[in-house]
Amino acid sequence: MIESIHKYAKIGLIHFMAYPSTIKGEGPIEETIRKIAVDDYFDAIEITWIKDGETRKRAKKMLDSSHLTIAYGGQPRTLTTGQNINDIDEEKRLITLTNLKEGIDEAYEMGAVGFGFLSGKYTEDKKEEAYQALVKSTKELCAYAKSKGNLKVALEVFDYDIDKCALIGPVDLVKRYAQEICAEFDNFGLMVDLSHLPILHESARQSLIPVKDYIIHAHMGNCMMKDKQDPAYGDAHPRFGYPGGENDVPELVEYLKVLLEIGYLNPDNRRFLSFEVKPVGDEDPDIVIANAKRVLNLAWALV
């Protein structure tokens, strides 16, 4: 493709993955957000909870002046606390729901346009109960977000049997779920991720085309499945080209082609296309980010 990728999407970076020391809402949040804000390759940023109110204010001031579009990742609020939004224990489900509603409040405070979350673990014998708990929770989150403004709510599709072992999940269940929620709420959609396709055992076409009408957010990255002893095994989002990894330039080319085909990449409606990459071990986060930009530049040239 000769035209710039920026014409077709808002190229973003998931701050708390690129700089994982910030994923628990603490650490060098301001200085790392600033690195992204001064890099004009990026049109968008995805942040997560910032526990300290004064730090939030200073981060918001930077973001307000950056011309970056902001999304809020609620995933760390449950992944780092062991909470489950589809817990069939009602008391635990409500605790998780309150946590994510607080995330929605923070997303509005930070000027975000989207809020992401993921489904939780389940057992096969209670799968339908977990599904109904997820539907109930999702509708409550959508209603809460809608009561406060125009924030979009997106469930990120994760693996179901490798790492996160989340309910949503294989594409047939993803489609059933998206249809059910979108029938009632126009502020809901799906978040898809190239990094998750191999661990979902699905190709880009298999995973995206059946749910193309519901996709409102997209990530791109890598995963590793070949060596369970490797620190990058599973859903750890190593850099593109990581030894033994599943995704590099050819896989990103195919993903971009499908996103273009289904109309997600669209000059008339530029949506998020964010890198989800994470340093492994003592890798330099800034080099990992530069790697991602080079891979996207080459992949887009080959689309």
Image (tube, rainbow, N blue to C red):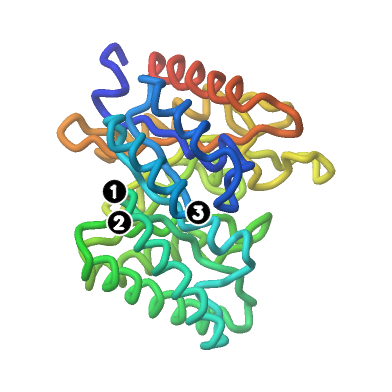
- What kind of residue is marked 3? Asp
User: Could you say which disc has been placed on residue 108 in the image?
Assistant: 2
Asked if the residue at tag 2 contacts the one at tag 3, i.e. Cβ–Cβ closer than 8 Å, the answer is no
Asked if the residue at tag 1 contacts the one at tag 2, i.e. Cβ–Cβ closer than 8 Å, the answer is yes
From the top left corner, tell me how far across and down residue 50 is, in percent. Answer: 49, 52
Quarter containing the C terminus: top left
* Residue neighbourhood size for the residue with mark 1, other residues' Cα within 10 Å, grouped as few (<14), some (14–19), many (≥20): some
Query: In this view of the protein, which residue sits in the foreground, 79 or 170?
Result: 79
From the top left corner, tell me how far across and down residue 73 is, in percent. Answer: 45, 52
- What kind of residue is marked 1? Gly
Q: Secondary structure beneath disc 3?
A: loop
Query: In this view of the protein, which residue sits in the foreground, 220 or 94?
Result: 94
Residue bearing the label numbered 1: 111
From the top left corner, tell me how far across and down residue 118 is, in percent. Answer: 49, 61
For marks 3 and 2 on the same chain, the one whose residue lies earlier in the sequence: 3
> Rounded to the nearest whole Å, what is the CA distance between mark 1 and mark 3?
17 Å
* Residue neighbourhood size for the residue with mark 3, other residues' Cα within 10 Å, grouped as few (<14), some (14–19), many (≥20): few
Relative to 85, is 261 on the left or the right?
Answer: left
Query: Residue at horizontal 63%, vertical 39%?
Result: 223
Relative to 134, is 226 on the left or the right?
Answer: right
Query: In this view of the protein, which residue sits in the foreground, 117 or 248?
Result: 117
* Residue neighbourhood size for the residue with mark 2, other residues' Cα within 10 Å, grouped as few (<14), some (14–19), many (≥20): many
Residue bearing the label numbered 3: 52
